[in-house]
Amino acid sequence: MEPPQSRRHDDTGTGQRRPWVVGVSGASGTPYAAAVLRALLHAGEAVDLVVSRASRLTLLDETGIAFRDAHWREDLGDWLARGADGTPDRFAAALPDLSDVRHWAAGDLAAGPSSGSYPVKGMLIVPASTACVAGVALGLSKDLLQRTASVTLKERRRLVVVVRETPLNGQTLKHLVALDEAGAVVLPASPAFYAGATHIQDLVDFVAGRVLDAAEVPHKLYQRWEGAVGGSRRER
């Protein structure tokens, strides 16, 4: 009999693991990636993780965490436990189970997600740098992150690109239009304030929640608009 863990991520009736691929590029915004990863895992989704070389420098700069291939699970746990304000153990008590996370090295172009025959639900690139946007739009496939994004598009799977840059120049805007035309969801890391944010984590969680909305994964990361002006303030 199949273990419940594998059935939990199967929506085909075959018992086959079908993860979301989460790609982390070198743009500033590693708390966005952490919030998306936590929420996916809490929702019972399997995750395949691709952390680009450039993103490791950003992660080190923004959190002090050195993400190492040989110790990736330990480093991922430290990262996901950290709050957006830098508090080291903010989420430690409710850290999701990491047993169904699979890590692929960014330089491994023979990795599972590099092939369209590898079963996945789709891919979330969070955050996406302008270099990453350009590479995916042009089909460069210079690393596993870009290759997986290209595969996601060609297989007509859901691709959510969380671009994190400002201002945007004309060339990047053209690349984003190209991604939209190719079927990707272009989702700028643009937090809103109507949900009653009182902390930096609230703003990060709003963006992460919109990412999960685009992936059609249930969550409770932010308070939804219900048509009542000031409703979020009244409920605090």
Image: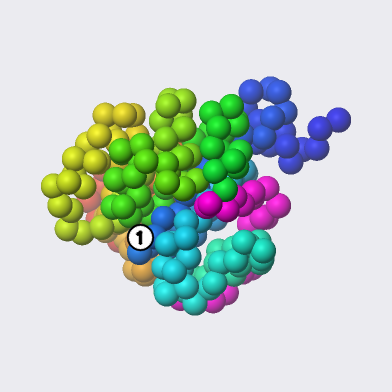
**Which residue is found at the position 25% from the left and 34% from the top?**
178
Residue 90 shows in this picture: no
The residue indicated by pointer 1 is 27
Quarter of the image for the C terminus: give it.
Answer: bottom left
- Numbered range of the magenta stretch: 86-107
Q: Is residue 89 left or right of residue 99?
A: left
State yes or no: residue 89 in magenta.
yes
Please identify the quarter of the rendering in which residue 5 is found. top right
> Looking at the picture, how far across and down is residue 31, in whole percent?
43, 63
User: As shown in the figure, which amino acid type bears the numbered disc 1?
Assistant: Ala
Q: Residue at x 62, y 27 (%)?
A: 11
Is residue 53 shown left or right of residue 229? right
In the shown orientation, is residue 225 left or right of residue 73? Answer: left
Camera-side residue of 26 and 22: 26
Residue depicted at x 41% and y 55%: 25
Is 162 covered by the magenta stretch? no
Q: Position of residue 115 (x, y in %)?
A: 55, 32
Residue sitting nearer the eye, 11 or 162: 162
Local secondary structure at mark 1? loop
Q: The N terminus is located in which quarter? A: top right
Q: Residues within 10 Å of mark 1 (few under 14, many from 20)?
A: many
> In terms of secondary structure, what is the magenta stretch mainly?
loop
Here the colouring is rainbow
Determine the residue positioned at 60% across, 66% down.
Answer: 68
> Looking at the image, can residue 21 be seen?
yes
Q: Say above or below: 7 vs 129.
A: above
Q: Nearer the viewer, residue 95 or 23?
A: 23
Q: Residue furthest right?
A: 1
* Above/below status of 194 relative to 152: below
Compared to 122, does 94 lie above or below? below
Residue 18, position in %: x, y? 61, 34
